[in-house]
Image (cartoon, rainbow, N blue to C red):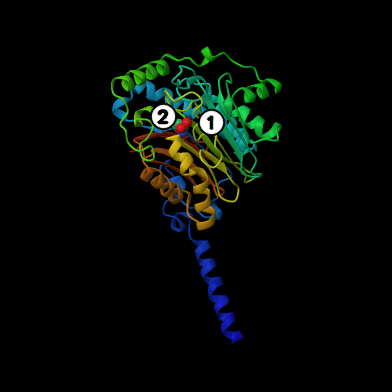
Amino acid sequence: MRKRNYSLVFFLCLQVCWLNMLPVDAQNRNSNRTAEEGASARTGPAARPQFMFAIHGGAGAIERSKMTPALEKEYRAKLTEALEAGYRILNNNGSALDAVEAALRIMEDSPLFNAGKGAVFTSAGTNELDASIMDGRTLMAGSVAGLKHIKNPISLARMVMEKSPHVMMAGDGAETFAKQQGVALVPQSYFYTERRWKEWRAKVEEERSKPPKKTSRLVAPLMADEDQHGTVGAVALDKAGNLAAGTSTGGITNKKFGRIGDSPIIGAGTYANNQTCAVSATGDGEFFIRSVVAHDISALVGYKGMSVKDAADAVLDKVKQLGGTGGVIVLDHEGHVAMSFNTAGMYRGFIGPDGKAVIEIYRD
Ligand code: ASP
């Protein structure tokens, strides 16, 4: 009996040795990374990159035919700048949280994205911003909603996490907290951009001329696909093995004043846990809240052992069944990235230790 056990152990050892001798490529045929699926490949513990960083700039009806070469160049340049900011921090042994915050500040300061400077307008012609951040090491989180005078909501979300006993602060109270922390407030006029103003006016006109169809609120998306892009998000894995995620948005064009989407809701728009993965979402907020998207993805990775790509796709399918559209970026503790979406496109990119930013916009 004992003899048979010894031979079994010997046989298993032989198998493990043989598997370890295989090149990484043979262990995993998908190790040729592309933003869409390659980075989501499981390259095994031996191939775990020292760090990894991914961002998105919103999902929606982003199609080649609607994009000018000049505008595409601007998007690519800004996405590259944000990725490289994260890269520098992570490469210099900085934290995942610092990388997420730095990249999102750059995107918030750009009029290209629906966050910070480029925020969309509410039905009252105002701008109201939401953001959140989460530390996968401690499960600490910070979130802000309905801000009207904060240039960089992602940094205020981090202050809520690190300098208050709370997770979420909204409206005037959050802005009073910002002042107490020495954050300078900006006037609403800071958020004015002609592009977003025109989009809002067009939306108001459209709704005036054809009132929305009376479909069930449970299945009807609250906005058309073309309205929903520009939210920004980032996920990072640092050299110490810690994950972080963050998301920042102006919400959706012509949203009712006071409306809050999924981006500042921990577990819906943002989630990070060192044991599983970091997630940032973009899309129909109401659907992402009801599907608890970010935590659901983490749960599938944690409880079911699913890959980040499979988990992201499964949860986005559930969102789609409810009638919602959008996308997610997901990064696990082994450095695998998934960038999934059920819209025509999603601004997205990732960068690893080789320092080469990979940017993609369209589906193909
Ligand atoms: N999810 C955001 C919200 O509903 C919008 C977006 O990501 O485009 O506020």
- CA separation in Å, label 1 and label 2: 22 Å
Q: Quadrant of the N terminus?
A: bottom right
Considering only order in the chain, which callout, 2 or 1, is on the residue closer to the N terminus? Answer: 1
Q: Position of residue 253 (x, y in %)?
A: 42, 24
Q: Secondary structure at mark 2?
A: loop
| Front in this rendered view, residue 44 or 344 | 344
In percent of the image, x 38 and y 22: which residue is there?
A: 71
Instruction: Judge: label 2 CB < 8 Å from ligand 1.
Output: yes
Identify the residue shown where x is 32% and y is 33%: 214
Residue 229 disc label: 2
- The x and y percentages for residue 97 are 62, 36
Q: Is residue 340 left or right of residue 128?
A: left
The residue where tag 1 is placed is 84
**Is 22 drawn above or below residue 252 in the view shown?**
below
Q: Is residue 229 visible?
A: yes
Mark 1: secondary structure: helix
Instruction: Using the rendered image of the protein, determine whether residue 53 is visible from the camera's viewpoint.
Output: no
Q: Residue at x 46, y 58 (%)?
A: 27
Crowding around mark 1 (Cα neighbors within 10 Å: few <14, some 14 to 19, many 20+) is: many
Which quarter of the picture shows residue 45?
bottom right
Point out the image quarter for the C terminus: top left
What kind of residue is marked 1?
Glu
Front-lying residue, 166 or 136: 166
**At label 2, which amino acid type do we have?**
His
Q: Which mark is residue 47?
A: none
